[in-house]
Amino acid sequence: MSNKQVFHSHIWQEEAEENNPFEAKACYCHGYDVYGDLLGKVSWSEYLYLLLKGERPSPIQAQLLESLAVAFANRGPRDHSIRAAMNGGVGGTTAAGSLMAALAVGAGQYGGAHEVFHAVNVWQCAGQDITQWQTMIQQLLADKAVDIWLPMEHAPGFDPNGESCTTPTRQTLAYLSGFIEGGALQWLNHHRETLEELATCPLSMTGVAAAALFDLGFSAEQAEMVFLLLRLPGAAAHAMEQQALGWKKFPFIASMIELENDPGSLGVPSIEEFGL
């Protein structure tokens, strides 16, 4: 009987090293030799597309995904997932803890990955039909079933707290819409104001991301995963920065902290005397 270990994957195949069964000698991603053929010849975005879609992206698709990655690499301290990572950093948690905080907060339905999931589903069902968009939004908001996620309370891809479409959202949409002729992004750019009236709130960056990921051919599940991945660089950078700066320079918060019962007045060493 053979002791050869076998695993089953349509994505990945390996050949073990002769003298080390715990390491691979050759790795194949959807048939491509990763370290023999792909390394040094493809970009990170192209490899990500290959991993998830099982085929090489066209040059236009690769450029669109690369540009989308730049747009979402760092959404800044106002982004909830970035703030979560910053909280981890300033609190002294581990690197993994900061990133897990960013993933947890950035996974939700208010500017998060699951909102992108819903928005891609709308694209799949409604396409470029305004009437179908209205129907899909109404149906989604009327669905009050609760499972892992609570019911949606706003149209996915739109900002329930906004009064107008933000400048970065308009800039990103305008640029990305130039990649695929007749695609979702181009249609969204032309019909943004009409859709905002249907949604009763302005388009958000999650809406732009959903249209781009739909244009790239990703399913709702794949789009949700990609959106989580693309936002991690900013979370990592801000978590490390905040860890070095400390809580006194935490954005928007430190200046609002006032001690009503300062222990220093009671002869107890103050925070400053502890060097914090």
Image (cartoon, grey):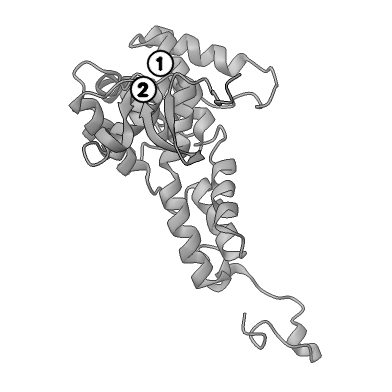
Q: Is residue 114 above or below residue 219?
A: below
Q: In the image, 246: left or right of 181?
A: right
Dot 2 falls on a residue whose secondary structure is loop
Disc 2 versus disc 1: distance between alpha carbons? Answer: 28 Å
Q: Position of residue 180 (x, y in %)?
A: 21, 22
Residue behind mark 2: 30
What is the crowding at mark 2: few (fewer than 14 residues within 10 Å), some, or many (at least 20)? some
267 vs 213, nearest the viewer: 213
Furthest residue toward bottom: 267
Please tell me which residue is depicted at 45% across the width and 12% down the height of the picture: 134
240 vs 210, nearest the viewer: 240
Q: Quadrant of the N terminus?
A: top right
Can you tell which of label 2 and label 1 is closer to the viewer? 2
Marks 2/1 in contact by CB < 8 Å: the verdict is: no
Furthest residue toward right: 266
Kindly indicate the quadrant of the structure image that contains residue 202.
Answer: top left
What is the crowding at mark 1: few (fewer than 14 residues within 10 Å), some, or many (at least 20)? many
Residue behind mark 1: 123
